[in-house]
């Protein structure tokens, strides 16, 4: 048996220790690097904001609340980028909305994405139209965890500005986008839990995109009558608007059912939104979604068949 001197054994031990420590440091650095890469590539919690920021076309469906929890689970497995939760023509029921949203959370998808919360945004259309200059409905919907607000019948820039201010918190000292000054009061307990972030993280992310490039909230302004069409260029200049929506149904009623006049109004909204650098939204079905995409609409609302056809047309398959 060959005896190795103690000094040599000690040197060998120190060498092995240094080697193991160095290996662990390398593994740690690689893991940290991977973590940073993931967080940097996923700037937003919501896929739909990331898609819009990258110039993609997005697709959504109306919430199937009549099916309750089962409907929400079904929607969580769909191809929708967002859900249009309608309280204007549906019921004003925040508890129903909150329950529906909870069933959109899919633990398996959360693990795959590596990001908290749902991957399907929930945009709430409030009942109050622009003339009512409502604030509390917006605050309440956002405090429950909504990712966006849809306001019907906006007619003036003043009304649009009120929506922006109602969605924003007063901004902290040092930020560059203090204006428009926010009106929203602090108390987003349920939203913090639903988004899966800390309170401070929520406050930093709960701002309107693209005014705040890191914001997660989307502000859809609906143009639905002749007054709105007459003022749409001024409306589009309001900072804090995320997109304009041309509403075919109400525009059709505003123009007395005249298809040509209605389509002209729709194209006016699209033209103004595009010139302002804003995505434009419209309802669509499987038979006209390809045409609407080719015209330049980037936010489409409809059923599962429309989404499937639209995704293929937009090159998202």
Image (cartoon, helix red, strand yellow):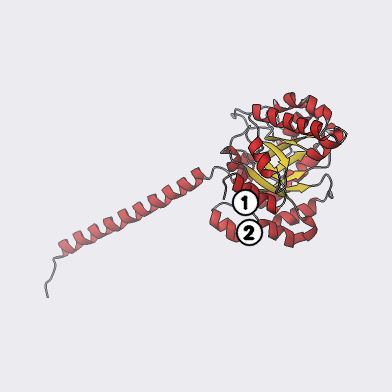
Say which residue appears at 54% left-offset and 57% top-offset.
112
Residue furthest to the left: 2
Foreground: 142 or 92?
92
The disc label shown at residue 106, or none: 2
Residue 101 in the image: x percent, y percent?
A: 71, 54
Please say if 187 is above or below 25.
above
Residue 131's x, y, as percent?
A: 85, 32
Query: Residue 119 has which mark?
Result: 1
Q: In which quarter of the image is residue 253?
A: top right
Q: What element carries label 2?
A: loop
For residue 103, say whether it is visible: no
Residue 203, placed above or below residue 155 = below
Say few, some or many: other residues with alpha carbon within 10 Å of mark 1 (under 14 / 14 to 19 / 20 or more): many
**How packed is label 2: few (under 14 Cα within 10 Å), some, or many (20 or more)?**
some
Q: In which quarter of the image is the N terminus?
A: bottom left
- Give the residue drawn at x 79%, y 50%: 94
Q: Is mark 1 on a helix, strand or loop?
A: loop
Kindly check if marks 1 and 2 are in contact, taking CB atoms under 8 A apart as contact: yes
Q: Is residue 1 left or right of residue 201?
A: left
Quarter location, residue 231: top right
Instruction: Mark yes or no: residue 76 visible.
Output: yes
Whether 131 is drawn above or below 217: the answer is above
């Amino acid at each position: 048996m060959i005896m190795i001197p103690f000094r040599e054994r000690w040197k060998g031990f120190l060498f092995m220790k240094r080697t193991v420590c160095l290996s662990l440091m390398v593994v740690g650095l690689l893991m940290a690097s991977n973590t940073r890469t993931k967080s940097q590539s996923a700037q937003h919690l919501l896929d739909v904001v990331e898609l819009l920021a990258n110039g993609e076309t997005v697709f959504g469906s109306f919430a199937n609340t009549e099916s309750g929890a089962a409907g929400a689970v079904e929607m969580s497995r769909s191809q929708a980028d967002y859900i249009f939760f309608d309280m204007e023509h549906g019921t004003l029921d925040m508890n129903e909305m909150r329950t529906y949203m909870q069933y959109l959370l899919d633990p398996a998808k959360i693990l795959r994405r590596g990001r908290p919360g749902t991957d399907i945004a929930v945009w709430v259309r409030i009942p109050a139209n622009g003339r009512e200059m409502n604030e509390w409905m917006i605050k309440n919907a956002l405090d429950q965890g909504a990712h966006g607000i849809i306001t019907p019948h906006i007619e003036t820039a003043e009304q649009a500005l009120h929506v922006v201010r109602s969605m924003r918190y007063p901004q902290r000292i040092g930020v560059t986008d203090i204006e428009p000054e926010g009106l929203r009061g602090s108390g987003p307990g349920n939203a913090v839990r639903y988004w899966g972030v800390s309170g401070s993280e929520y406050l930093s992310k709960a701002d309107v995109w693209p005014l705040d490039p890191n914001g997660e909230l989307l502000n859809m302004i609906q143009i639905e009558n002749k007054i709105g069409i007459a003022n749409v260029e001024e409306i589009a200049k309001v900072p804090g608007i995320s997109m304009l929506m041309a509403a075919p149904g109400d525009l059709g009623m505003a123009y007395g059912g005249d298809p040509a006049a209605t389509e002209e109004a729709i194209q006016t909204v699209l033209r103004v939104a595009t010139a302002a650098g804003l995505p434009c939204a419209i309802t669509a079905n499987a038979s006209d979604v390809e045409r609407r995409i080719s015209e330049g609409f980037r936010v489409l609302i409809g059923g599962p068949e429309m989404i499937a056809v639209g995704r293929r047309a937009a090159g998202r398959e």
